[in-house]
Amino acid sequence: MRRAFPGYAAAPGMALGRVRLEQPARFSIDNTPLPDSETESEVARLERAFAVAREDMAELRRKLHGALAREVGEFIDAHAQLLDDPELIEGLRAMIRKGHYRAAAALKAQRDRLVAVFDNMDDPYLRSRGEDVDHVIARVQSALARQASSEEKKLATRVGEILVAESVAPGELAHMASHGILAVVAGSGSQYSHSAILARSLHLPMLVNTDGVLEDLRDGDLVLVDAVRGEVIVHPAAQDLAQFRNWQREALREGQRLAQLAGAETRTRDGHKLRLYANAERSEDIERARNLGAAGIGLYRTEFLFLAHDGLPSEDEQFHAYRDAVLGAGGLPVTLRTLDLGADKADAAGLVMASEPNPALGVRGVRLSLRQPDVFVTQLRAILRASCYGPLRILVPMVTEAVELVEVRRLLRECARDLRTAGHEIPDQFELGAMVEVPAAALNVRALLEVADFLAIGSNDLTQYVLAADRNNDQLGKLYQPAHPAVLRMLAHVIGRARMARKPVCLCGEIAGDPVFACMLIALGLEDFSMLPDRILAQRDALSRCSRKTMRALAPRLLRARDRDEVAALLEDAQKL
Ligand code: PEP
Ligand code: MG
């Protein structure tokens, strides 16, 4: 029976696929004992599920190439080994034969036992291996559930899978994306979370805050994710499928229209030139940015390299990734942001403290880097070595005070000296910039401008800190408003001060790529925008419809607005002119 659940579209698009529930603990597991007569057929079901899971992994391995194969391949190999572990399989067979467990119940009991063993380990690396056990057993559970034959199975096995989970951490999403999922449905979450940003970058339609979906969906159900209107439809009807096909056709047409803007200049309606940079997390983003005519990479989030890695990437591994980014940009400037771990981005190597009471206000970004000089110096050395291959700028996240940037510059100078002594070619000059995302840094931006070569405004975090509203908390969605006049005043102040100091200032939060905010940012004086590569053409199109002169004249009224609705009304009126 068709059922629809409303959700919030955090990454646009539509997808049709079968459900992969990521919380097997929430499956309704049948715990009634098996009759003697059924134990052998249950063992056979379990073995078939293992075989299917093994085949899934092997297929995935075959599909991976390039850097992804290197990074994700290790995960897959580790998982494949677990699937072949004779003790695990023998233990499960014994539970079914002697304990009369059903296969799913035996798997769950084994999972809980093994995860508890890993959870109690002191070594953070070993502790994190518990997650692998969890993933492997989830795979077998999922294969087991799929054995229940249904009418939909024939259709569903031809399409991909849709990840349905209560919440998805960015590291987990990076990992899942490489498993070929088509879309993500999360029970909680918000559009400004790092997971949502990553989903947009990976072109994965994502619905967040989708109430009731976890209780209702079963592994293998056929669903249509509509992250345009914001709903997930279980057992879609013929008219839903027709709508899906229409959307596919429409998306193709709009893509073709926008494609004509690739490589074009970005100008406002009255001819003022603007620069659109790309935010990048992976090498593919850089290639796409270049093809679309981006002015460069305005924000390269290096932490995703750490999130996708088991343990810490070495200096050489980092150097190769950064050098490839610089080479890939083909002479366009690349702005590498140093590690921004902490808050919702926890790393596999356990650098981030798990138990901070207030992680968003805790040891994150440059605060963490300065407390872990060994890790930070390794990254700075890799960045400096990569800077010989093309124009590279270094950007520091979560700066609160100018002294933090001064300390980073001192470390950079030390690293450059050591590298030169060791025979490396290191350029004499490097550009060092600060992210402005902490209100204190924004209000006191004059001090920062004395020590920074450039600024990048992180409006995602600035908004959450100005409004004291967690960007990941869907309950505060109404309060988290980047167009709030208090945020606007802060943005205008930072942009204005940077322009007075004749230092470049770019905005690289999500609103930089949102057509709804295009004219508003022009009004505040912004000329450099950095966004997901996929947003570049649509934003170029939207900006070409704004008159800079009209918008700049509107700025004083926007900054006097009382609330977001007044801001919206002013913008709407101005756009009619
Ligand atoms: C921001 O805060 O706006 C930003 C660009 O950084 P991130 O989203 O990675 O925190
Ligand atoms: Mg930020």
Image: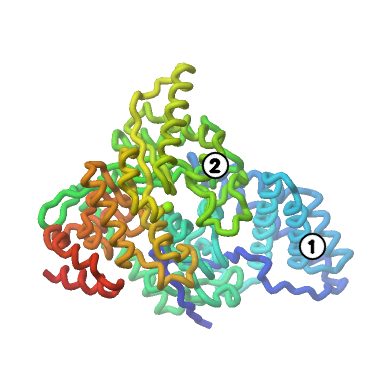
Describe the element under mark 2 as helix, strand or loop. Answer: helix
Snapshot quadrant of residue 493: bottom left
Secondary structure at numbered mark 1: helix
What's the residue type where badge 1 is placed?
Val
Residue 333 position, x and y percent, is 31, 37
Give the CA separation, mark 1 to mark 2: 35 Å
Residue name at image x 56 percent, y 34 percent: 374
Q: Position of residue 75 (x, y in %)?
A: 61, 46
State how the image is colored: rainbow
**Any mark on residue 71, and which?**
2
Q: Amino acid at mark 2?
A: Glu
Quadrant of res 74: top right
Q: Is residue 97 visible?
A: yes
Instruction: Say which of marks 1 and 2 sits in front.
Output: 2
Question: What is the crowding at mark 1: few (fewer than 14 residues within 10 Å), some, or many (at least 20)?
Answer: many
Is there a contact, CB below 8 Å, between mark 1 and mark 2?
no
Q: Which residue is mark 1?
A: 43
Q: Is residue 253 visible?
A: no
Q: Does the residue tagged 1 have its C-beta within 8 Å of any atom of ligand 1?
A: no
Which sits earlier in the primary sequence, circle 1 or circle 2? 1
Q: Quadrant of residue 492?
A: bottom left
Q: How many marks can you see? A: 2
Residue displayed at 43% across by 78% down: 238
Q: Is residue 144 above or below residue 69?
A: below
Q: Residues within 10 Å of mark 2 (few under 14, many from 20)?
A: some
Residue 53, numbered label: none
